[in-house]
Amino acid sequence: MSQVLANELADKRVLTTDGQEIGTLYSITADLDSGALDTLIVETDRHEVYGIESNANGRVSLPADTLEAISEHVVITPPE
């Protein structure tokens, strides 16, 4: 995956690999030592995504390994 600036990701629609819209990307977290992505925080109206429940603010924290692609949208795949 090529490099993408974090500010380019703000408010991107988040879709599953089968085309379901999950919500919008709210934020990301990264490991400060390695720089590796840690978590995708998605604002959603769903109670859960891939079995991970949303919090009281309507956000779900997905492991970074769910990230499949970034284009016009952020595409995610089920966690392993």
Image (spheres, rainbow, N blue to C red):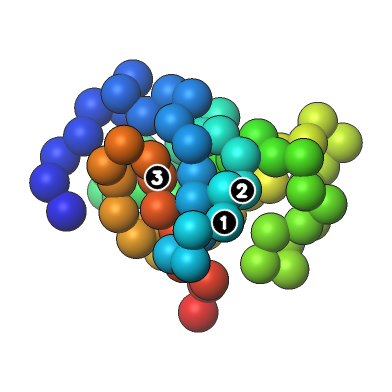
Q: Amino acid at mark 2?
A: Ile
Q: Badge 1 is on which residue?
A: 20
CB under 8 Å between discs 1 and 2:
yes
For disc 3, the neighbor class at 10 Å (few under 14, some 14 to 19, many from 20) is many
Single out the mark in the foreground, 1 or 3. 1
CA separation in Å, label 3 and label 2: 10 Å
Taking 58 as reference, is 76 left or right? Answer: left
CA separation in Å, label 1 and label 2: 6 Å
| Residue placed most toward the observer, 58 or 12 | 12
Q: Amino acid at mark 1?
A: Gln
* SS class, disc 3: strand
Residue 64, above or below 77: above
Residue 40, above or below 62: above
Q: Indicate which disc residue 74 carries.
A: 3
CA separation in Å, label 1 and label 3: 12 Å
> Reading the chain from its start, which is encountered first: label 1 or label 3?
1
